[in-house]
Image (spheres, grey):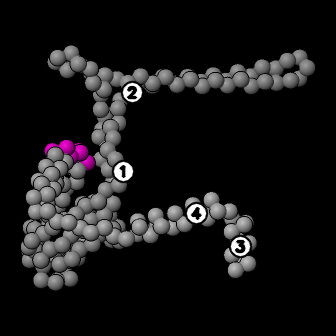
Amino acid sequence: MKDYKELLGKIGKDKLLLMAAAGIVLIVCSVPAEKKENKNNNSEQKGIQQETLQISAEEKSSISLYVENLETRLADIIGEIEGVKNVHVMITVKGSEGKEILKDENISSDNTKESDGAGGERNISSYNKDENTIYYKDSSGAQYPYVLSEIMPEIEGVAVVADGGDSPVIKEKIINLIKALFGLEINKIMVTV
């Protein structure tokens, strides 16, 4: 009993009450709340989810479209291999897209060496670089930067699931096809037939 009074004296009543309240709050927060299902509310949520999927499908980025196009084309090519049916492809990418813009660069450098009569020397160097973006005008007179190339994200991995009679020969053909098309290492390709 004496230990309890000493502990209470060291901590103080205010701090002890605060710790007790925090403990009660933690206990209450850890107890799961009951779920009440409402069929009308559930159908409203499904409608909201469908709208969200529809909106997000309309707002797909060019990277998503690029990847989907590659997946479709790869699935079509794999489907042409004899003995392969029901092909599903997933491609993962790393990085982002970009554009290489044509620029007019003017670079100048100047090196000057000075000597004085006392034998001292001084080197002065200057470097100047000016970049100006090259623009072109369309028929309406709007200006756009001249694009040299578009850079798409790097393909990081490919997964293929297909019906192929569990043939190791078909699996090897698919892997070799993916390696040839994308230059991927074998550890970045997964094929299940």
Of tags 1 and 2, the one toward the viewer is: 1
Which is in the foreground here, disc 1 or disc 4?
4
The answer to whether residue 5 is above or below residue 71 is below
Earlier in the chain: of badge 1 and badge 2, it is: 1
The residue pinned by badge 4 equals 17
Residue beneath label 1, please? 95
Question: Which class describes the residues within 10 Å of circle 3: few (<14), some (14-19), or many (20+)?
Answer: few
Name the quadrant containing residue 104: top left
Where disc 4 sits, the SS reads helix
> If the image is split into quadrants, where does the N terminus sit?
bottom right
- For badge 3, the amino acid type reads Lys
Task: Specify start and end residues of the magenta stretch as a single range.
Answer: 58-63
Query: Residue flagged by tag 1: what amino acid is it?
Result: Gly
Query: Mark 2 near mark 4, Cβ–Cβ under 8 Å?
Result: no
Q: CA distance from mark 2 to mark 3?
A: 79 Å
In the image, 82 versus 191, the foreground residue is 191
- Residue drawn at the location 10% of the way across and 68% of the way down: 79
Instruction: Say which mark, if any, is on residue 182.
Output: none
Tell us which disc is closer to us: 2 or 4. Answer: 4
Q: Residue furthest right?
A: 118
**Earlier along the polypeptide chain: callout 1 or callout 3?**
3
Identify which residue is drawn at 31% across, 34% down. 148
Query: In this picture, is 41 found above or below 116?
Result: below
Disc 1 versus disc 3: nearer the observer: 3
Q: Which residue is mark 2?
A: 103
Secondary structure at numbered mark 2:
strand
User: Spatial distance from mark 4 to mark 3, Cα to Cα?
Assistant: 15 Å
* Residue 138 percent coordinates (x, y): 20, 20
Q: Position of residue 119 (x, y in %)?
A: 89, 23
Q: Residues within 10 Å of mark 2 (few under 14, many from 20)?
A: some
First of labels 2, 4 by sequence position: 4
Q: Mark 3 sits on what residue?
A: 5
